[in-house]
Amino acid sequence: MSFLRFVMLLSLVVWIGGLIFFAFVLAPTAFSIPEILPNTHLAGNVVGRALTKLHWIAIFSGVIFLASSLLHSRFTDGTAHVFAARHILLCMMLALTLISQFGIIPRMDVLRASLGDVRAAPIDNPERVRFDALHVWSTRVEGAVLLLGLVVVYLTAQPLGLR
């Protein structure tokens, strides 16, 4: 059973660690070092591709977590506890990640392609306004996934009776 708990925690560490790295290291760095990425369009392309890869890591990690957590519960308690808080929260994390990957990001990509360098477009340009609104939603969704993930880490790290 300890191996299943290890897999559960590892999958969460990979997902949440990736989110933290993306939000606090990769994205800010990509937009702040002009010697490496001389304009925001290139930085946006790098960040967009990294986010897509992060989403696929998240989806894979989420499925691994759910499978190992359900098995762990089944082996230790005799029932899978499908509606345990950690499972519900993780399903919410997966849903938000899927919304971002297949709903928000593709629309942002289309707008970025039509605008070119987004920051060069006038602030009142309708496409820029839509892009900025989608960016706000993307940031909110990723922030919500991070917060939910931290709660899932806490619940998963607790002794068996508190989850």
Image (cartoon, grey):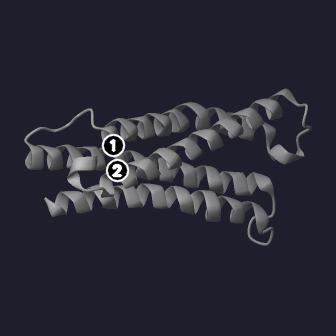
Q: Residue furthest front?
A: 161
Image quadrant where one finds the N terminus: bottom left
Label 2–label 1 contact, CB within 8 A: yes
Residue of label 1: 86
Q: CA distance from mark 2 to mark 1?
A: 6 Å
Indicate which disc, 2 or 1, sits on the residue closer to the N terminus: 1
Q: Residue furthest bottom?
A: 35
Relative vertical location of residue 36 with respect to residue 118 in this rendering, above or below: below
In the shown orientation, is residue 40 left or right of residue 108?
right
Residue of label 2: 155
Please identify the quarter of the rendering in which residue 36 is found.
Answer: bottom right
Q: Position of residue 80 (x, y in %)?
A: 16, 38
Name the residue type under label 2. Answer: Leu
Residue at image x 64%, y 54%? 47
Say few, some or many: other residues with alpha carbon within 10 Å of mark 1 (under 14 / 14 to 19 / 20 or more): many
Name the residue type under label 1. Answer: Arg
Residue at image x 56%, y 63%? 21
